[in-house]
Image (cartoon, rainbow, N blue to C red):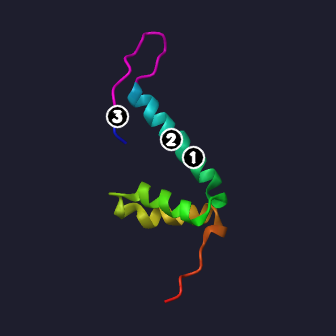
């Protein structure tokens, strides 16, 4: 994710933008994993493909993780 600007630490416990962005990405990712099985297949595929851009080496590992958490997302193979 690209960062567009920054927050300075205001000395009152304020979060810098980079920290806030990382925290939000973590929360959003956890939420997506929690509801993964409830998402339509096309949304699952789009989200997964977006997340895996540039991370080909981890693709199989994360696909397995999702299928272990949400077995009903195991889709039948597409006919030839």
Which numbered disc covers residue 26? Answer: 2
Report the side of 20 relative to 69 (left or right).
Answer: left
Percent from the top left, x then y, of residue 51? 43, 54
State which region is magenta.
3-16
Residue placed under numbered mark 1 in the picture? 30
At numbered mark 1, what does the secondary structure look like: helix, strand or loop? helix
Quadrant showing the N terminus: top left
**How many angstroms separate mark 2 from mark 1 (CA)?**
6 Å
At numbered mark 3, what does the secondary structure look like: helix, strand or loop? loop
Is the residue 2 above or below the residue 66 in the image? above
Residue at the farthest bottom position? 80
Q: Is residue 65 visible?
A: no
What residue is at 33 percent from the left and 26 percent from the top? 5
**How many angstroms separate mark 1 from mark 3 (CA)?**
21 Å
Q: Are marks 2 and 1 in contact (CB under 8 Å)?
A: yes
What residue is at 35 percent from the left and 63 percent from the top? 56
Which numbered disc covers residue 71? Answer: none
Q: Is residue 7 visible?
A: yes
> Is the magenta region chiefly helix, strand or loop?
loop
Choose mark 1 or mark 3, whichever is in front. 3
Is the residue 57 above or below the residue 22 in the image? below
Residue placed under numbered mark 3 in the picture? 3
- Give the mark nearest the N terminus, 1 or 3: 3
Percent from the top left, x then y, of residue 13? 49, 15
């Amino acid at each position: 994710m690209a960062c567009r600007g920054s927050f300075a630490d205001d000395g009152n416990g304020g979060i810098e933008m980079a920290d806030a962005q990382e925290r939000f990405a973590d929360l959003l990712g956890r939420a997506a994993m929690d509801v993964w099985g409830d998402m339509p297949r096309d949304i699952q595929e789009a989200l997964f493909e977006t997340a895996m851009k540039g991370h080909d080496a981890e693709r199989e590992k994360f696909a397995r993780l999702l299928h272990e958490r949400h077995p009903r997302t195991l889709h039948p193979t597409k006919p030839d």
